[in-house]
Amino acid sequence: IDVTAAEETVVKSTLDGTIIYAGWSEEDGNIIQIQHTDDIISIYKHLDKLLKKTGDKVTAGSPIALIGDTGKLSTGDHLHFELWYKGETVDPSKYINF
């Protein structure tokens, strides 16, 4: 899902976990992927600035990045958020109140 917010709004980790990827993609700009327990992965795209690096441990609610408008697929300041469970995408809005 896409969540609109002002540029440089703080993005926080959904759950406790470990950053398994913090980097850049031409299409999605700055990206963070977090491995959580129970085979859950959260993905955050189009970020302006990454505040964590691969391998960092994070807790639920801790700042991980700032919202931005990076990557060819971005349509303005927003966060593209994905939630994966056991290798399949799930609708985040069924689990998180945005």
Image (tube, grey):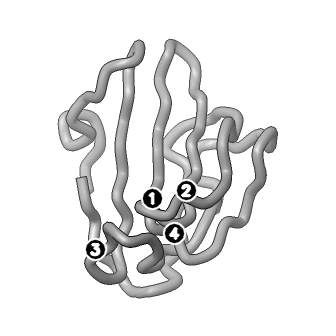
Give the vertical position of 85 relative to 18 (above or below).
above
Q: Residues within 10 Å of mark 4 (few under 14, many from 20)?
A: many
Query: Which mark, by number, is residue 4?
Result: 3
**Which residue was labeled with disc 4?**
47
Query: How many marks are shown on the rendered structure?
Result: 4
Element type at marker 4?
A: strand
Tag 4 near tag 1, CB within 8 Å: yes
* Mark-to-mark CA distance, 4 and 1: 5 Å
Q: Residue at x 54, y 37 (%)?
A: 15
Of badges 1 and 3, nearer the viewer stands: 1
Q: Position of residue 18 (x, y in %)?
A: 70, 34
Tag 4 near tag 2, CB within 8 Å: yes
Q: Residues within 10 Å of mark 3 (few under 14, many from 20)?
A: some
**Which residue was labeled with disc 1?**
45
* Mark-to-mark CA distance, 4 and 3: 12 Å
Element type at marker 3?
A: strand
* Mark-to-mark CA distance, 4 and 2: 6 Å
Left or right: residue 40 compared with residue 96: right
Tag 2 near tag 3, CB within 8 Å: no
Q: Position of residue 96 (x, y in %)?
A: 29, 43
* Mark-to-mark CA distance, 2 and 3: 16 Å
Tag 1 near tag 2, CB within 8 Å: yes
Sequence-earlier tag: 1 or 2: 2
The image quarter containing residue 88 is: top left
* Mark-to-mark CA distance, 1 and 3: 12 Å
Sequence-earlier tag: 4 or 3: 3
Between residue 7 and residue 96, name the one nearer to us. 7
Give the vertical position of 59 relative to 81 (above or below).
above
Element type at marker 2?
A: strand
